[in-house]
Image: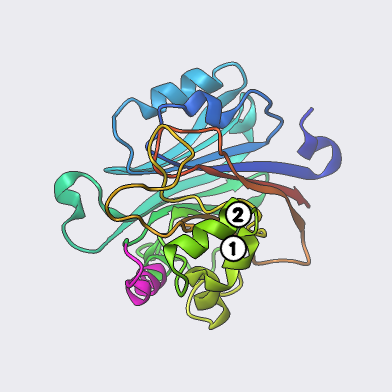
Amino acid sequence: MSAVEQFGYMHMCGYLEHEWADLAEVVGNSRTFDLLIVGLQEVPRHNILRLLQTALIESYILLGKATMQSLHLYVFGPKDSELFIKELKVDKQSVGGFGGLIGRKKGAVAIRINYRGIQMMFISCHLSAHAHKVEERNRECKHISHSLFSKNWNPYARPTQITVWLGDLNYRIQGIDNYPARNLIRKDLHSQLTSNDQLLKEAEKGQIFNGYCEGTLTFKPTYKYNIGTSNYDTSYKVRVPSWTDRILFKIQEMDEMNVTLDSYEAMDNIHSSDHKPVKAHLCIKT
């Protein structure tokens, strides 16, 4: 019997990934989740789903997927979980200009699902890069939020109760030079950099993610690393390390459920990308 049936709890684990060869290690071996959400950006090849299904074959089945070129989103559940789905819809929304020409389109893909009577939406998102494009990222966030599932919007339908954004949102650390920032990280004082985080500053001003929650950024900035290592960028660009990869969530009906964030962390042992994947574990009590 699942945790939901027995206690009214539901456990969701979300993984945010970026160009992975280490998918089996990312999704892990210990799984007691009712839903497993995997969001990917800049997916480099077409067999990602097969690799995920191989890694999860003993315990999970695919419930839904949404893709747009290099942007992917997958929802997995236990083998009997299809019985608890009343609705599942997908949508996508592109932003920006010519990224699609090289198969790295910016934008978002989304899955809306009614699972065990809870209306949820999951979004895998990739926003514009570069530190100076804060306002452009803000506009893209708002456009995506207003556009997804808007074509067939039903004003009488039950609103989404839980929304989860997983993304390479590309907000950067700004206002501190590269080497002072790296020095703080090397001394495990990276929490001092949160005051320079563009996403937190824009959210505090009410520009983006109104009503959303995020765990504390206790992990080191997730970008940019030399591929194959845990060393920050040593290329000629020498980028300032930043928390580009984030997972945020929003609860619409707080009086009907209790949602706790059990963990929010980066996976430093993954070296196949210039980003470190991020994972979050949400526990929902209805």
The boundaries of the magenta stretch are 130-143
Three-letter code, disc 2: Gln
Q: Tell me the residue at 47%/28% (across/down).
A: 23
Q: Tell me the residue at 76%/31% (across/down).
A: 2
Residue bearing the label numbered 1: 158
- Whether residue 195 is in magenta: the answer is no
**Secondary structure beneath disc 1?**
loop
Q: Position of residue 154 (x, y in %)?
A: 47, 66
**Which class describes the residues within 10 Å of circle 1: few (<14), some (14-19), or many (20+)?**
few
Q: Position of residue 104 (x, y in %)?
A: 25, 47
Using the image as rendered, state which of residue 143 and residue 154 is in the foreground.
143
Residue bearing the label numbered 2: 119
User: Mark 2 to mark 1: distance in Å?
Assistant: 8 Å
Q: Compared to 147, does 70 lie above or below?
A: above
Q: Tell me the residue at 64%/26% (across/down).
A: 80
Three-letter code, disc 1: Arg
Q: Position of residue 249 (x, y in %)?
A: 60, 59
Q: Is residue 44 visible?
A: yes
| Earlier-in-chain disc, 2 versus 1 | 2
